[in-house]
Image (cartoon, grey):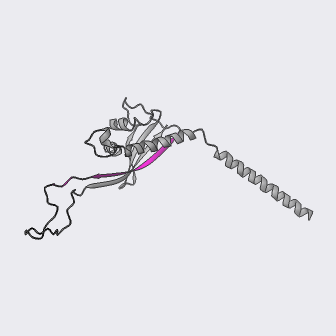
Amino acid sequence: MARAFIFSIDAFVALTVMLIMLHSLILISAIPSTYYSGLTQASYLARDTLAMLSNTDASQVIGPAHQSNLLAYVINQDRAQVYRLRVGSLIPQQYGYSMDMWNVSGNDWIELYNTASDNSPDNGHNKFFHKLKVSSQRLYMGYVSSERDSGEPIYSYLTCSGAQIPCDAPPLLYEAGNASLSIVRLTVYR
């Protein structure tokens, strides 16, 4: 009986020591690293920059000729100057950034702009990845169409006797356009 009691105490002590070790491991791993605040800031920066670009009307920033959001305007440009002006002005210079678009046919990312490959003297952003790298994605939907001739009648009538009976559904006012759906990724690094 005394021997069983000793084994029970031994098992209880071993269980207690194991629980203390497990608790201390969880506690140590839960302490954020030194880069945690910078990582959080970069994550918010990437997410908020993409949100601002996709929610801002380009006609208010650039002019009435551009009837899309600012994100569509930026990614449809091939000039690095547009990226520096529209995206780079939102990201502090201690960070570098790159914008990529998902290529559906190739199943890979197409790099649209990267501060590391921009050798212009106007580019004052960080060019090297040292400590942290965070990305945020946004869905990009683009649609382009041209308007039909407005002189075309909407309804077609059965007879020329003046009966007001439409025989067909009214035609669409717009020609079939090109629709695109893609994912845009903004990666912020430091």
Residue 7 position in % (x across, y down)? 86, 61
Residue 43 position in % (x across, y down)? 49, 43
Vertical position of residue 35 compared to residue 171: above or below: above
- Quarter of the image for residue 52 reads top left
Residue furthest out toward the front: 163
Image position of 36 (left or right of 55): right
Identify the residue at image location x=33%, y=35%: 81
Vertical position of residue 85 compared to residue 14: above or below: above
- Asked whether residue 111 appears in the rendered view, the answer is no
Vertical position of residue 173 compared to residue 56: above or below: below
Residue furthest out toward the right: 2
> Residues in magenta?
132-150
Residue furthest out toward the top: 121
Residue furthest out toward the left: 161
- Asked whether residue 75 appears in the rendered view, the answer is yes
Q: Main structural element of the magenta stretch: helix, strand or loop?
A: strand
Identify the residue at image location x=39%, y=32%: 123
> Magenta stretch: residue 146 in it?
yes
How many tags in the picture?
0
Identify the residue at image location x=85%, y=58%: 9
Looking at the rendered image, the quarter that the N terminus falls into is bottom right
Residue 38 position in % (x across, y down)? 54, 38
Image position of 48 (left or right of 155): right
Image position of 72 (left or right of 149): right
Image position of 47 (left or right of 80): right
For the residue pair 66 and 78, the one nearer the viewer reads as 66
> Magenta stretch: residue 2 in it?
no
